[in-house]
Image (cartoon, rainbow, N blue to C red):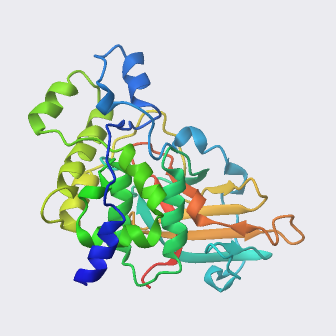
């Protein structure tokens, strides 16, 4: 293990991180803050989001299928797989319980009857996030918790050279050296609690809550020890979720009409498990196309809840 960690760590040797930008709940944080007339943030706290998919991208909801009675479902995991772990679609109704991942620290988890809608994965780290989700399908030995930690490191803009040896090993199996270098170049420096308070004075909620969660996570990733439960407590807000700005009334049964011509529905059980359902009509042009979960995000109708990355890995395996 020592030798393996040394080899994994060598991927990171010589990579120099520079100041990047932190993300906000919606779009470019610097522009959001400027538009609200609040104090201008320094460069280390403004810029494009690693994952920017939000409610404005979830334009595929189909209310006309509310109340639709689906036929008997087949096992989606039994469909033919693409080389990158996607599912080659056949006519019929297919579902599976998939591993999913939080992509929005400092927000509430799924619940309360709020539905989720399909949207494409977007953001400056789209390539890295997609690679992690696709490559993890062929590596079932990598624990779901470790994949989640890696994704949290990305959305928090942590310096990958500061991750512990075990997480560096995971990163080296799911990302290329070029991708790791790119993530390091967009990383943020660590700031103390008092520095954070000074730099974010006047930033409104809920943007400030998200920024604070990510700042705390960066500190934790650079620490001598890393406990998943501690990171989870920072990423997940406790208590009842309010109705976020820009929310769309979305029942949990809402389907989305995918641009490729089929319907998809996401029903989460917490952030780490999502029931994915797909319906393909007979003689549909979608037959033979690939549903690639790695480029899909389940977006909550309530913007106060977490958006969820999807994967082709079956939950519990």
Q: Can I make out residue 139 in this image? A: yes
Using the image, determine if residue 171 lies above or below residue 26: below
Tell me what residue is drawn at x 55 percent, y 46 percent. Answer: 122
170 or 289: nearer the eye?
Answer: 170
Residue at the limit of the structure toward the left, as seen here: 194
Tell me what residue is drawn at x 36 percent, y 62 percent. Answer: 150
The x, y position of residue 136, in whole percent, is 48, 74
Answer left or right for 270 relative to 297: left
Q: Can I make out residue 267 in this image? A: no
Using the image, determine if residue 216 lies above or below residue 66: above
In which quadrant of the rendered image does the N terminus lie? bottom left
Tell me what residue is drawn at x 22 percent, y 81 percent. Answer: 2
The x, y position of residue 195, in whole percent, is 13, 32
Using the image, determine if residue 213 lies above or below residue 286: above
The x, y position of residue 309, in whole percent, is 49, 59
Displayed quadrant of residue 284: bottom right
């Amino acid at each position: 293990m020592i030798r393996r960690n040394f080899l994994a760590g060598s991927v990171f040797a010589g990579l120099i991180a520079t100041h990047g930008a932190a993300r906000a709940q919606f779009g470019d944080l610097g522009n959001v803050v400027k538009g609200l007339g609040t104090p201008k943030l320094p460069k280390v706290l403004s810029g494009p989001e690693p994952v920017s998919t939000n409610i404005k991208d979830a334009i595929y909801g189909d209310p006309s299928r509310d109340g639709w009675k689906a036929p008997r479902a087949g096992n989606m995991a039994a469909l033919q797989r693409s080389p990158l772990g996607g599912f080659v679609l056949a006519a019929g109704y297919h579902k599976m319980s998939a591993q999913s991942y939080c992509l929005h620290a400092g927000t509430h988890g799924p619940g309360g009857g709020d539905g989720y809608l399909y949207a494409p994965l977007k953001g400056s780290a789209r390539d890295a996030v997609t690679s992690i989700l696709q490559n993890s399908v062929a590596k079932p030995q990598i624990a779901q918790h470790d994949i989640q930690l890696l994704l949290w490191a990305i959305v928090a803009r942590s310096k990958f050279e500061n991750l512990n040896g075990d997480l560096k090993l995971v990163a080296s199996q799911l990302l290329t050296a070029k991708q790791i270098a790119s993530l390091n170049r967009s990383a943020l420096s660590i700031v103390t609690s008092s520095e954070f308070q000074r730099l974010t004075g006047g930033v409104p909620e809920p943007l400030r809550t998200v920024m604070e969660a990510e700042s705390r996570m960066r500190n934790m990733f650079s620490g001598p020890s890393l406990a998943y439960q501690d990171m989870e407590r920072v990423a997940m807000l406790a208590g009842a979720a309010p109705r976020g700005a820009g929310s769309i009334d979305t029942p949990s049964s809402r389907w989305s009409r995918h641009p490729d011509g089929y319907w998809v529905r996401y029903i989460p059980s917490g952030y780490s498990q999502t029931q994915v359902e797909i319906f393909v009509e007979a003689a549909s042009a979608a037959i033979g196309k690939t549903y690639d979960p790695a480029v899909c995000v389940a977006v909550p109708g309530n913007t106060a809840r977490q958006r969820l990355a999807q994967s082709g890995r079956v939950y519990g395996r």
